Amino acid sequence: MAAANPQFLFDFGSPNAYLSHLVIPEIEKRTGAKFEYVPILLGGIFKMTNNRSPMEAFSGIKNKLEFHAIETRRFLQRYHLQPYTMNPFFPVNTLLLMRGAVAAEFDGVLDRYVDAAYHHMWNEPKKMDDVEVAVKAMTSSGLDAERLFTRTRDDEVKNRLMENSQNAVARGAFGSPTFFVGDEIFFGKEQLRDVEELLVAQKA
Amino acid sequence: MAAANPQFLFDFGSPNAYLSHLVIPEIEKRTGAKFEYVPILLGGIFKMTNNRSPMEAFSGIKNKLEFHAIETRRFLQRYHLQPYTMNPFFPVNTLLLMRGAVAAEFDGVLDRYVDAAYHHMWNEPKKMDDVEVAVKAMTSSGLDAERLFTRTRDDEVKNRLMENSQNAVARGAFGSPTFFVGDEIFFGKEQLRDVEELLVAQKA
């Protein structure tokens, strides 16, 4: 039996998930594995686990956010990435965008949707929780944004996002980015190294 | 000019520092580097940075301590280590033991002191903040514990431990274990991999 695809649980609001998204293609190339992108609502996971973003949780702790920045600098160096542009509207409420990802998945256009949404969140950052801004941006990237965002009102879409988030917590998630290889959970962009190691080991 | 020795900032109260201590000899063997052991008071660093132990900080967050246990399990596997025995008196106040480490450093017996103290904290765990227990344990390991613990009352010893801890925070530390390679700071036993990578790169 072939090993299950690794999973990447993502929310467009997390810059560390964005950086992971940039690295996943080269890991896929090196390992031959194909990541399954699983839309979750990070705010929902935080509520269910009583967790907070690093920015909130570490803000009162001396040196901790600075160390977080050092880790990001090292990650960018390791994978030869450019620094992201901090979204000036951070934190962006991603409910619409994440429901849109589920709708895009139902429509078979998740890959393009993910690339476009990440672009407009962290590459040319916009206030993507403003529906007009979001429609305009995603349309400019060639997506049928009107259709996708209309579908975000469907129960099927809403429920799927909630179920994905609840399942994530049931499997051990508490933040972003989270990866699964089978039942093995990995947390944080730094652990993409461990994900890759395990994928290589499984292949051997 | 030769690269400076890597530094390991340690407190006997931290199980993650203990596990790092077990791995350092093999990293020294592979890289040819020799780690400098720098005694710090973790409780002091927590006070200066407003930080807390993972056990406290994560106790209210679902899945977080469980993930911490997964990381430890993976660390043990990676380095072929046995699980440590949780010290039943945890958290042990390590002020006496850490001042004793400074005294041992002054006396040129830090290596033996460190091995012995870690043994009695995490291998055959005892209530090492009880001075009688500590004297007996360290004496049984062949150290002049009476002399060392008497010296913990010297200002020279007290001040050195305080200075080490203050310097650590000034250089970016906030918890345990912390490592420095030159000015590059690393945090957490998992980052011993990064420490080793940097040591290898510096050598090349």
Image (tube, coloured by chain):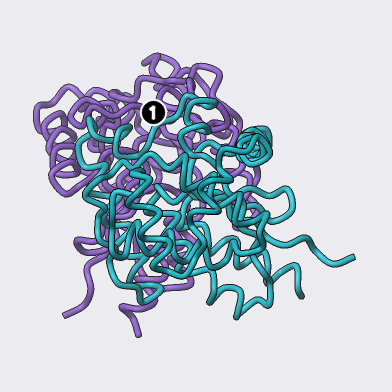
Chain colours: A purple, B cyan
Left-right relation of A180 to B119: left
Res. A107 in view: no
Residue furthest to the bottom in view is A204
Residue B201 screen position, x and y as percent = 71, 69
Q: Nearer the viewer, residue B147 or A79?
A: B147
Q: Nearer the viewer, residue A154 or B63?
A: B63
Left-right relation of A184 to B80: left
**Residue marked by disc 1:** A53
Identify the residue at image location x=31%, y=65%: B123
Residue B104 screen position, x and y as percent = 59, 56
Residue B25 screen position, x and y as percent = 54, 74
In this rendering, is residue A84 above or below A201? above
Q: Nearer the viewer, residue A123 or B201?
A: B201
Q: Nearer the viewer, residue A175 or B147?
A: B147
Please give the chain letter of the residue carrying mark 1: A
Q: Considering the image in quadrants, where does the N terminus of chain A appear?
A: bottom left
Left-right relation of A160 to B97: left
Where is residue A139, by image quadrant? top left
SS type, badge 1: loop
